[in-house]
Amino acid sequence: MQGVFQIIKLNFRLEWSARQSYFSLLIYILSTVYISNLVFEQTIGLESWNAFFWVIFLFAAVQAAYRSFYFEADRRFLLYFGLVAPESLILGKILYNFLYLGVLGLFTVLIFGGLMGFPMANPEAFLLILFLSALGFSAILTLVSGIAAKAGANPALPAILSIPLLYPQIITLSKLSLRSLSGFSWEVNAPLLIVLSLLALVSLLLSYLLFPYLWRD
Amino acid sequence: MKGIWWKLLGPLLILYSISMGLYGPVPRLPILNETIRVLYYHVPMWFSMIAMMLASLIFSIQALGEKEGADLKAFEFARTGFLLASLGLITGMVWARFTWGAFWVNDPKLNGTAVTMLIYLAYFVLRSSVEEAQKRARLAGVYNIFAFVMMIVFIGILPRMTDSLHPGNGGNPGFNQYDLDSNMRPIFYAAVLGWILIGLWISQLRIRYKKLRDAKTI
């Protein structure tokens, strides 16, 4: 547990020392949101709101998580090697990415909602879905960015590898979030919420179990 | 698998399922009519694909345990599985054209197959972008395990939670309303077994070929 927090703190400090990555991601979100604003001249329907929001958030999340192992393919891996166990490393990275993606998701909601309106009928449900998705995304994206970093310099690789793995979650959560926009019943949607949480849990477990094999060299 | 018996059995079972599939009696159901015979040609593809992917998964787990040659086997079984999936997709699209009126509709089961194929395409891309054999075995093994679990979630769990046009909706995602007819059952099971054996044979031939080629270059 000590190692997990050490990794989170270290990650934050290293990322903060290269702050432009945070800001470039914000600008990325801002510009993609603005494109969807330009494309839709009139008011936007609920389904389009839902689709655009999740596509923008998904690509921002892929970009954000891609950085988590980008700089440590060789040298920093060696540094970590003596510092912590692989299990704490992956948990720390996933937790860090979870926090990162959670904040990123809130920013996307703010920017996207600011320009396109906030149509949520049930904001609590929408936020819950957003955080569950941040958890599931971070579990898959962290492991996949580890794979991509080890595989070498193919810039398209993180997106190719991670997006198909995210489909089950995306399909479930886009259905749920559309319902949270139009009117949400907790009883009716409980099974889908459980599926979404289980998907996040399974991804977390798989990343945790499989990461030690990636790490060895 | 050793011996020659299963290499004879596989083609025989498939010949039986093809001839009896065209010739045998089938129930007369509205809309489906004679297209119900696609059960013998389309559904076995998915069953045998899952069998191939399962074999691939097992070899990938062995590859993570650093077993010699397991990575090659995992790759070749995934390739055969992908071939069977493509055949299943094509037969399914022909069937959909005649019963639903379109080659492709937006349906949970069709999405599931499309995603499965994309996941395994990503697996092949990952393999091709790593040169070093040991590293490739590890990276591809990790990804393959993840891919298999997500595939099962996508084709086995999610379709059960949503409505679908596809026959066999609710319960078994493959089929069940056809299954009532006892004339069809033996032919269908023969086709499934036959295609699994053929898939094994294809993979085995590819594995041998690759091994010989690698031995030659060294």
Image (tube, rainbow, N blue to C red):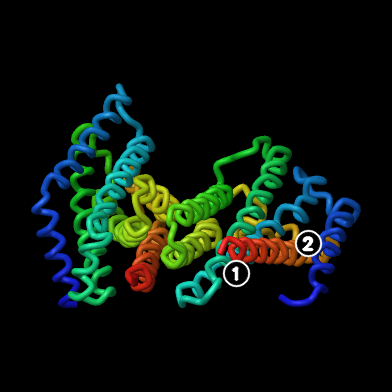
Location of residue A209 in the rendering, given as x and y in whole percent from the top left corner? 37, 73
**Pointer 2 and pointer 1: residues touching (CB < 8 Å)?**
no
Front label number (2 vs 1): 1
Location of residue A127 in the rendering, given as x and y in whole percent from the top left corner? 25, 53
Residue assigned mark 2: B191
| Residue B118 appears anywhere in the view | yes
Secondary element under disc 2, as helix, strand or loop, is helix
Secondary element under disc 1, as helix, strand or loop, is helix
Q: Chain of mark 2?
A: B
Residue drawn where x is 74% and y is 62% of the image: B198
Quick one: A177 or B130, which is closer to the camera? B130
Location of residue A167 in the rendering, given as x and y in whole percent from the top left corner? 44, 52
**A16 relative to A122 in the view: left or right:** left
Q: Quadrant of the C terminus of chain B?
A: bottom right
Q: Which mark is residue A180?
A: none
| Residue A187 appears anywhere in the view | no
Quadrant in the picture for residue A77: bottom left
Q: In the displayed structure, would residue B129 be above or below residue B76?
A: above
Residue drawn where x is 58% and y is 61% of the image: B217
Q: Residues within 10 Å of mark 1 (few under 14, many from 20)?
A: many
Q: Chain of mark 1?
A: B
Q: Quadrant of the N terminus of chain B?
A: bottom right
Location of residue B206 in the rendering, given as x and y in whole percent from the top left corner? 66, 61
Q: Amino acid at mark 2?
A: Ala
Residue assigned mark 1: B55
Quadrant in the picture for residue B176: bottom right
- Give how far apart the Cα atoms at labels 2 and 1 are: 19 Å
Q: In the displayed structure, would residue B217 be above or below residue A167?
A: below
